[in-house]
Amino acid sequence: MTEVSVRCCVVGGGPAGMMLGMLLARGGVDVLVLEKHGDFLRDFRGDTIHPSTLQVMHELGLLDELLRRPHTQARTVSAVIGGQQVEVADFSHLPTRCGFIALMPQWDFLDFVAEHAKRYPNFRLMMRTEATGLIEEGGVVRGVRAHGPEGELEIRADLVVGADGRHSVLREQSGFKLFDLGAPIDVLWMRLSRRADDPVAALGRIAAGHILVTLDRGDYWQCAFVIPKGGIEEVKARGLPAFREAIVQIAPLFADRVQELTSWDDVKLLTVTVNRLREWSRAGLLMIGDAAHAMSPVGGVGINLAIQDAVATANLLGADLRRGAVGPMALRRVQRRRETATRITQRLQVLVQNRVITRVLGAQQAPGVPLVLRLLQMMPSLRQWPARLIGLGVLPEHVETKEG
């Protein structure tokens, strides 16, 4: 068994883990990130990089280089409800460097962060290395056991950070209690080709019994078809032709390309979960990102909330980690800092799920435009408020750590 010692071992190479690894290494902390896959190429991940994250990249001096990578920009959010297009949010007036959402494949973003993190000599990234268990001594987490290409590893660390997603291995082994807020929906993800003459499409389309989200990925549309929780078997029972027809009914734009869905293998199920830990830490261990709080896809804020967790963790714990002394009180500061934003965001997501999405999915007639959205059409200045909630979040974080 190979033994490794580091100040901080981050388990999970997603947005929270990679960003935290880079920030800690930038601040002079010896950090190791474990990623169980051999690359970042997982399709149908969250690809919306919101203004709050773009602001973080600006504060790190990396924004211009990031935006040179292929991406599209969404300066507004609109929806088609019962055949009527409505404007929901306008990001162009936000008090940030970028007044838009950047739509960039998550693997490109993670590759970019990893590339810059590797420039610091105290950063290490081990791909194809999966954490298998915690190392505990006297009730304190002292590291993790892992399996990689070279065999078994024992990684000793002053702090272990679990950023291994909503199916976290570390969370399961740590004994943390999970509070489930419930989610009445699931999402079917797919891609359909994008033509050069395609018009700018609304982000969301709402019709009787159906909701479709379309994200412009340059040469194709990434589409999310919302269904009731556990409804995948019923959808499949109706058959693929009926599913294609449902897409065309809500988005006639795709009538000439839904045949690209040749089998159910072209449709991926995202089981929606909304939950959070009651306690995010114990001695020697901290959970962040989806491992601490799984978010609904409503608003597309999951990746950005995870990155905010990473920024706050680096701000609050960086100095302690350099000294090699991170006590339980210091770890609890991270939860106190980020929990309010998490709770408010999840509460709003659950409200939208239960009061809006569920009603639409059960409707037999085309819905009308809700009063609040009618007000946004009459008073465009009000669109800055949903833009702030979506684009900046409840408590946006800023990089406070110094390089070196």
Image (cartoon, rainbow, N blue to C red):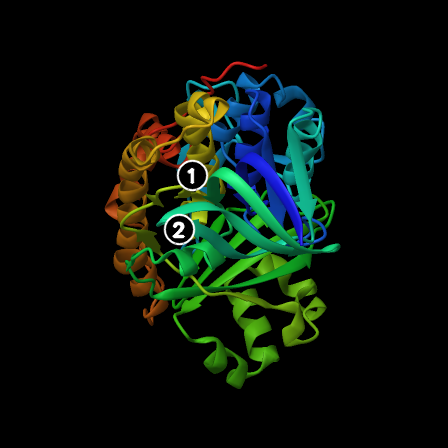
Q: Which residue is mark 2?
A: 295
**If you read the primary sequence from the N terminus, does the residue marked by circle 1 or circle 2 appear first?**
2
* Amino acid type indicated by mark 2: Met
Q: Give the left or right position of residue 384, taking residue 99 as reference.
A: left
- Residue at mark 1 to residue at mark 2: CA–CA distance: 9 Å
Q: 308 or 212: nearer the eye?
A: 308
Q: 73 or 205: nearer the eye?
A: 73
Q: Quadrant of the C terminus?
A: top right
Name the residue: 72% across, 52% down: 38
Name the residue: 63% across, 49% down: 35
Q: Is residue 256 above or below residue 379?
A: below
Q: Give the left or right position of residue 211, taking residue 352 as reference.
A: right
Q: Quadrant of residue 196?
A: top right
Mark sitting on residue 305 = 1
Q: Where is residue 252 drawn, in percent x and y? A: 58, 61
Whether residue 171 can be seen here: yes
Mark 1 surroundings within 10 Å by alpha-carbon count, few (fewer than 14), some (14 through 19), many (20 or more): many
Q: Where is residue 299 drawn, in percent x and y? A: 41, 45
